[in-house]
Image (cartoon, helix red, strand yellow):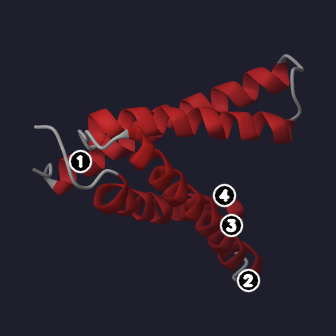
Amino acid sequence: MDRPLLPQFLRYGFVGVAAAVAHYGLLFALVHWEIAGDVLGTLAGFIAGGIVSYVLNRRFTFASDRAHGAAMPRFAAIAFGGFVLTGILMWILSDEFGLHYMLAQPLITLIVMVWTFAGNRFWTFAGNRSA
């Protein structure tokens, strides 16, 4: 049985914060300690944040028992869609409409969060759920 939408969305938001901490923490550490540059650091951080997001969303947000072999590729596809959507929205809001990127980013984050939540709720982790 699906969890109620609003509490599940709030859990998704908390998981997003944890994933961001992992992403930015690893990025900072790798760059600060001169282990990697900013591009490699942010890519490593993105992967770390994605792992945190997958694990916590699978258990905490969606209580899914879908097999990893089925859920992980779906999760990756949704994440990639969010990545592309982020780039397109930043281009439209910042480059085309002239909105400062620091004002555009929170709006983009909310839009992408709704996209990824819906995709993960109704596709990635849909189906068999534990109680």
Quick one: 41 or 55, which is closer to the camera?
Answer: 55
Residue 55's mark? Answer: none
Residue 87's mark? Answer: 3
> Which tag is nearer the camera, tag 2 or tag 4?
2
Most extreme residue toward the top, as rendered?
33
Of callouts 2 and 4, which one flags the residue occurring earlier in the amino acid sequence? Answer: 2
User: Which residue does the image show at 40% across and 47% down from the upper left?
Assistant: 71
User: Which residue does the image show at 67% across and 34% down from the upper left?
Assistant: 45
User: Which residue does the image show at 14% across and 49% down from the upper left?
Assistant: 3
Residue 1 position (above or below residue 91): above
Quadrant in which the C terminus appears: top left
Badge 2: residue crowd in 10 Å (few <14, some 14–19, many ≥20): few
Relative image position of residue 122 (x, y in whole percent): 29, 62
Kindly indicate whether the residue at mark 4 contacts the one at mark 1 (C-beta within 8 angstroms): no
Q: CA distance from mark 1 to mark 4?
A: 28 Å
Of callouts 2 and 3, which one flags the residue occurring earlier in the amino acid sequence? Answer: 3
Q: CA distance from mark 2 to mark 1?
A: 34 Å
Kindly indicate whether the residue at mark 3 contacts the one at mark 4 (C-beta within 8 angstroms): no
Badge 1: residue crowd in 10 Å (few <14, some 14–19, many ≥20): some
Residue 8's mark? Answer: 1
Residue 67 visible, this angle: yes
Residue 17 visible, this angle: no
The residue under label 4 is 102
Q: Amino acid type of disc 1?
A: Gln
Q: CA distance from mark 2 to mark 4?
A: 15 Å
Of callouts 2 and 1, which one flags the residue occurring earlier in the amino acid sequence? Answer: 1
Of callouts 3 and 1, which one flags the residue occurring earlier in the amino acid sequence? Answer: 1
